[in-house]
Amino acid sequence: MGKQGVSGTDTGIVMIGNAQLISLSRQIALQRQMDVVAHNVANINTTGFKAEQILFEEYEMPVARDRTFPGLDQPLSYVQDWATIHDLSGGAMTQTGNELDVALNGGGFFAVQTAAGERWTRAGSFQIDNNGTLVDASGNPVMGIGGPIQFGPEETGISIAADGAISTNAGPRGQLRIVEFDNPQALAREGSNLFSGGTPAPNANTRVTQGHVERSNVSGVSEMAELIRVTRAYESIASLTQKQDELRRTAIQRLGDTNS
C-alpha cells in the first residue's frame, strides 16, 4: 500500500496553526510591553524613578524535517522579549528648598539599609525619624560611609556638601554613602523605588545638590503615545487571530467533507 499524500487542506491547516502560534508570541510580547509602559506612566511623578524599556529579538524556531510534505519546511520566526533595560538618564532637577532633599548629578546611587540588606536608590527625599536617624521615604536608614547618619534633637542648620559631607550647628555628622556601578544594567528593580544587586564601587563622579530632588525621567507624552501604539497593535493581532480561527474551522470542515 503506497504512502498517502498530504492534501492542500492539510497543509493549509498546518500553516494556519503556525501563524496562530506566531501571533500568540507577539501578543504575549505586547502584553509584557504594555505592563512596562503602564508601570512607567504610573511613576511619572515618583521622585528619582527610572523608566524601563524592553528589548525584543527574533527567535527562529527549529523545525522538524518530514518528507511527507511536498514543499520544504519554512523558517518560523517568533517574537521573544530578550531583556528589560533601565533608562538611567537623569531626570529634571526641581528646587524645593528643603534641607533634607538631595539630588544626584551623575550616575551614582544613594545606599539605604533595608531588612533584606543594602539597596540602592536615586530618590533623595529624606527625613529624620523619631530616633534622629536620616531615613528615606519608606523609613529605611540612609547610609553614610561609616553607617547610618544620626542627628541630635537640638541640631539645626543641616548642610550637605557636593561630596555628600553632612554638617550641622554641632559640627560634622558624616558623609552620604554614594555608590557607582560599572554595569548599572545588572541592577534588579525592586519595590519602593529601590534597586538591588550589582557590584558597588566608591563614588567618583557623582555630585550632590542639596535642596533639590530629581524628578522621574519618564516622558509622559512619549509613554502615552507608546501605550496607544501597543494597545492598537494588540487589538490588531487579536482581530487577525480571530480570522485565523475562522479559516481553520473552515479548513477542518472541508477536510471532514472530503473524507466522508
Image (spheres, rainbow, N blue to C red):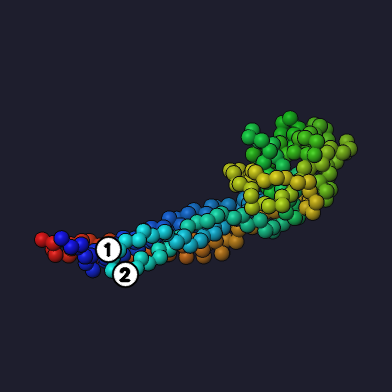
Image point 30% across, 63% down: which residue? 67
Residue 26, label in figure: none
Amino acid type for the residue under numbered disc 1 = Thr
The quarter of the displayed image where residue 220 is located: bottom right
- How far across and down, in percent of the image, does residue 94 sit? 71, 56
- How far across and down, in percent of the image, does residue 177 sit? 77, 42
User: Up-down: is 96 above or below 238?
Assistant: above
Q: Nearer the viewer, residue 154 or 30?
A: 30
Mark 2 secondary-structure assignment: loop
Image point 80% across, 31% down: which residue? 153
Mark 1 secondary-structure assignment: loop
Q: Nearer the viewer, residue 75 or 50?
A: 75
- Which quadrant would the C terminus be assigned to in this image? bottom left
Amino acid type for the residue under numbered disc 2 = Gly
User: Up-down: is 70 above or below 215?
Assistant: below
Task: Work out how far the residue at label 2 is from the one at label 1, CA to CA, in angstroms.
Answer: 9 Å
Within 10 Å of disc 2 (Cα), the crowding (few <14, some 14-19, many 20+) is: few
Q: In this figure, which residue is indicated by the disc labeled 1?
A: 68
Q: Nearer the viewer, residue 99 or 242?
A: 242
- Which quadrant would the N terminus be assigned to in this image? bottom left
Q: In this figure, which residue is indicated by the disc labeled 2?
A: 71
Q: Could one spot residue 220 in this view of the protein?
A: yes
Within 10 Å of disc 1 (Cα), the crowding (few <14, some 14-19, many 20+) is: few
Q: Could one spot residue 238 in this view of the protein?
A: no
Image point 59% across, 44% down: which residue? 190
The quarter of the displayed image where residue 54 is located: bottom right
Is there CB contact under 8 Å for labels 2 and 1?
Answer: no
User: Up-down: is 145 above or below 19?
Assistant: above
Image point 78% across, 53% down: which residue? 206
